[in-house]
Image (cartoon, rainbow, N blue to C red):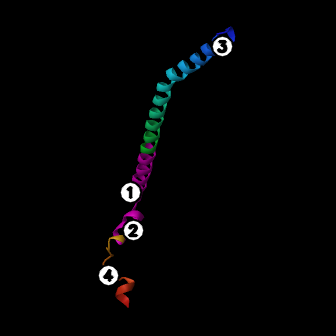
């Protein structure tokens, strides 16, 4: 084998060895990216739930919100009639 063939063979062997050694870190990167995506989705879901709960709490902490909730549940003021009863 001549000198050029040896250099090419060593270069190819180095590239193959490099690819083989870097395979596991790339696999680990994929696993970590999947975990990160899952964590971000969970965090976004928790933030949306918290925003809903804060909104619901603020609605229940003021008189207009409490009255609206009571009316949704069918409560009426004494002597008050609904539109359905007037028909």
Q: Which comes sooner in the sequence, label 4 or label 3? A: 3
Residue pictured at 40% horizontal, 63% vertical: 65
Mark 4 or 2, closer to the camera? 2
How many angstroms separate mark 4 from mark 1 (CA)? 26 Å
Element on which disc 2 rests: helix
Of the residues under marks 4 and 1, which one precedes in the sequence?
A: 1
- Mark before the other along the chain sequence, 4 or 2: 2
Which residue is located at x 42 percent, y 44 percent? 42
Q: Going from the N terminus, do you reach mark 2 or mark 1 first?
A: 1
Magenta extent: 43-71
Query: Does the residue at mark 2 contact the one at mark 1 (Cβ under 8 Å)?
Result: no
Between residue 41 and residue 14, name the one nearer to us: 14
- Quadrant in the picture for the N terminus: top right
Q: Residue at x 50, y 22 (%)?
A: 20
Question: What residue does disc 1 label?
Answer: 61
In this figure, which residue is indicated by the disc labeled 3?
5
Q: What residue is disc 4 on?
A: 79
Q: Residue at x 47, y 40 (%)?
A: 37
CA gap, disc 3 and disc 1 = 82 Å
Q: Could you say which disc has been placed on residue 48 in the image?
A: none
């Amino acid at each position: 084998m001549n000198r050029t063939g040896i250099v090419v063979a060593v270069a190819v062997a180095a590239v193959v060895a490099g690819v083989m050694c870097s395979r596991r870190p790339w696999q680990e990167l994929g696993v970590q990216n999947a975990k990160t995506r899952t964590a971000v989705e969970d965090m976004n879901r928790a933030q949306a739930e918290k925003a809903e709960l804060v909104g619901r709490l603020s609605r229940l902490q003021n008189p207009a919100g409490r009255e609206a909730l009571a009316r949704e549940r069918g409560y009426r003021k004494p002597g008050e009639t609904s539109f359905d009863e007037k028909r």
